[in-house]
Image (cartoon, grey):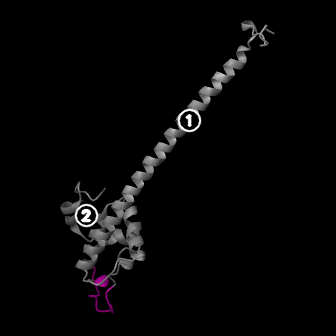
Amino acid sequence: MTPAGQPAVDSGSERPELLDKAREKKKSVALVTIRAREFLESVRDRTLARLKREELYRQAVEVVFAYWAARLHHPGALLDRKRENRLLARLRESGGDWGMLCYVIDGALRDDWIMGRKPDSERSYDGIETLFRDRAQVERLAELCPAFRAGEPHQLVVKYAPNGNGHE
């Protein structure tokens, strides 16, 4: 004890292993904090990109729906949740290539059964639920268009997409 009542500190008696552990703990906490911040920033960035992509997909769905309604003469049709979800699913499957979905509509116009032109066809089957039923149907109908088979972008994509290829 010192005369002032303080405990005497002997610099040689400090325990260096405790100081080293304390320093190491501080470094570990700082490293975890940095990594956590980097991880959260990465999650935020990916989330923003996904939300942006989804918004672009929803806009593309509106364009495809309007194209379908105009080309297949359904002026009073409404884009309800069921139709929107069906188109979104096919758009995601095609990697955002909404031009392919437009080719599906053009291909449907070439299909006599879908358009109700076959003698044994009682009506047309040109609804969104039929044209975009599944991936196989999308591929089959798009393949009916020579421009699609040639790898050309759809005319709407050329006209309206920022990069002209139908992708975001």
List the residue tagged with mark 2: 149
Residue 150 lies, in percent from the top left, at: 22, 61
Q: Residue at x 27, y 71 (%)?
A: 144
- Along the polypeptide, which appears first: circle 1 or circle 2? 1
Q: Residue at x 28, y 88 (%)?
A: 118
Residue 118 covered by magenta stretch: yes
What is the chief secondary structure element of the magenta stretch? loop
Residue 110 lies, in percent from the top left, at: 24, 78
Tell me if mark 2 has few (under 14), some (14-19) or many (20+) residues whose alpha carbon lies within 10 angstroms of its own: few
Q: Residue at x 25, y 81 (%)?
A: 72
118 in relation to 162, above or below: below
SS state under label 2: helix
Please state which of residues 82 and 92 is positioned toward the viewer in this rendering. 82
**Residue span colored magenta:** 111-124
SS state under label 1: helix
List the residue tagged with mark 1: 33
Residue 81 lies, in percent from the top left, at: 42, 75
Amino acid type, callout 2? Arg
**Is 153 positioned to the left or the right of 56 in the image?**
left
Query: Mark 1 near mark 2, Cβ–Cβ under 8 Å?
Result: no
**Residue at the outermost front position:** 4
**Is 72 positioned to the left or the right of 33 in the image?**
left
Instruction: Evaluate whether residue 142 shows in this view.
Output: no
The Cα atoms of the two marked residues, 1 and 2, are separated by: 53 Å
Single out the mark in the foreground, 1 or 2.
1
